[in-house]
Amino acid sequence: MMVATFSYFAWIAISPVNLILGYPFGQIPTDNIPLLMINSILYLPVIYTLIRRWLRTMAKRKSGPASGIDTVESGPAEPEPGDEWGKATRPYKTQDTTKITGSKSDLRDSALAIDAAFFVRYPDLDTGETLFDAEELHQKAMIRSKVSSGGWSDKRASTRGVGSLGAVESLKSGRPTRWRRPVGEVTSIHLPSTIIAAISRIGKLKKGEPIKIRPEDIRESVFTNRTPLTIILVIDVSLSMKGSLSVTRKIIERIERETRGSKDRVGVVAFKDSGAIEVQAPTTNWNKIYRALTRLRISGLTPLAEGLMKSLETIKRERMRNPDVESLVIVISDFAPNIPLAQSVGPGHAQFTPIKDLVKASRLIRKHNVRLVAVDVDRDHRMWSRVLKRPYHEALELAVTLRMKKDGLPSVSETILRVNEFRQQFSAFLIARASGGKTFLVEELLKEKSVLGRILSATRSDVRIDSASLKSAETYLVK
């Protein structure tokens, strides 16, 4: 900096333009502003040429001060004598960093400046437009006789008293279907198979000889039964849901119709503003759930990752009460998160990472073996099913897989985050993919005879796009 400043004033004092205009050698023409501007413009190419010549000269020197200055040369890297850190074997190639863990893993811009103090406030459930009509829910809560007669429930009378999850193996109750060698503590001995195992070990018995059963001969019964579900409704009550109130009410009413009168336990988690709140702990009493639903009001921002973490917290508490809980998380949202988790804001953390936190929360749900279904209520997302002529989840997976192959990207998640249109519309699929679940358009589920039946059948299957589907879709898109 000092060299540049000194050389600039020296140039103004000895510029040939000054001599031509009659100024003495070494005098700075302070009284002639246009002349100073002309000298400044001429100075830039002169100093640029001198610096380049000086750098080339220093790089060629073999000894002395500043010899061998490192320069970046074009073309492939070639090892040269004197490389102290080893020889170059291939040209340098830049590697893109993952956007899942990057500081710009946002789906849409934050509506305000986020800091740690923002998360101190609890979401305000008393502000905004109501999701359900309180009087309507009160009338439903008073109707009880119709449940026992079957007028309110889509379940058959024989299954209304049990759960929605059928044909689940258990070691405690139900109908015995098979036997097995004990794993851990024996719960129920299967006597016929135990005796057969003992005879097979002993061989032919003599007359009057008793059968001696050893520990290795014992077999235990395995039962199958209909298991109650613990369903956590994770409901988005942010302001962006205002245009989807009717379909949100319909899907919740369908779930209520299929679970009321059974032993399925239903809890409600709502999220908006700075976090999520458990509005109702899991219960079989839908009258309590009605009272919880009347508290829901639409307003604020969308902390979607916090809603997932709160649902996982609820399920962990339920498993402390009963380790055999079969859990299902149903996320009802338009999936446009714009608020990260509270622990992602603070010293040493990126200031805005809702997608990073969303993927993290989804993977934690998968790690804890929790079923998850993402119900997308955004009507603008229906185009993918219409264009690709497939159910919503399969259509999104096909679209992402085609783009991943085209761009040579490493994974589905990275493809979603790098393509702007995918980033804005595929967060429901991103959650389902990371958690091992499925995503549905709300219109798809409302057409089904049984919403829970469709959801449970989807979470048991692991559909992936085969090569034939990829080729046919590529041909269709090219046309």
Image (spheres, grey):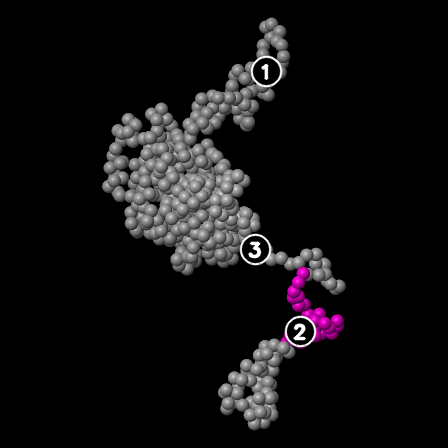
**Badges 1 and 2: C-beta atoms under 8 Å apart?**
no
- The local secondary structure at tag 2 comes to helix
Mark 2, residue position: 55
Which is nearer the N-term, disc 1 or disc 3?
Answer: 3
Q: How many marks?
A: 3
Residue 247 picture quarter = top left
Mark 3, residue position: 96
Q: Magenta-highlighted stretch: main secondary structure?
A: loop
Q: Amino acid at mark 1?
A: Ala
Query: Does 294 appear above or below 457?
Result: below
In the rendered image, residue 354, in percent from the top left (x then y), is placed at 45, 52
Q: Few, some or many C-alpha atoms within 10 Å of disc 1 (few <14, some 14-19, many ≥20)?
A: some
Q: Nearer the viewer, mark 1 or mark 2?
A: 2
Mark 1, residue position: 198
Q: Residue 261 — which label?
A: none
Q: Which residues are magenta?
A: 51-76
Q: Amino acid at mark 3?
A: Asp
Residue 325 picture quarter = top left
In the rendered image, residue 275, in percent from the top left (x then y), is placed at 40, 50
**416 with respect to 300 (left or right):** right
- The local secondary structure at tag 3 comes to loop
In the rendered image, the quadrant that contains the N terminus is bottom right
Q: Is residue 364 visible?
A: no
Task: Please tell me whether residue 75 belongs to the stretch shown in magenta.
Answer: yes
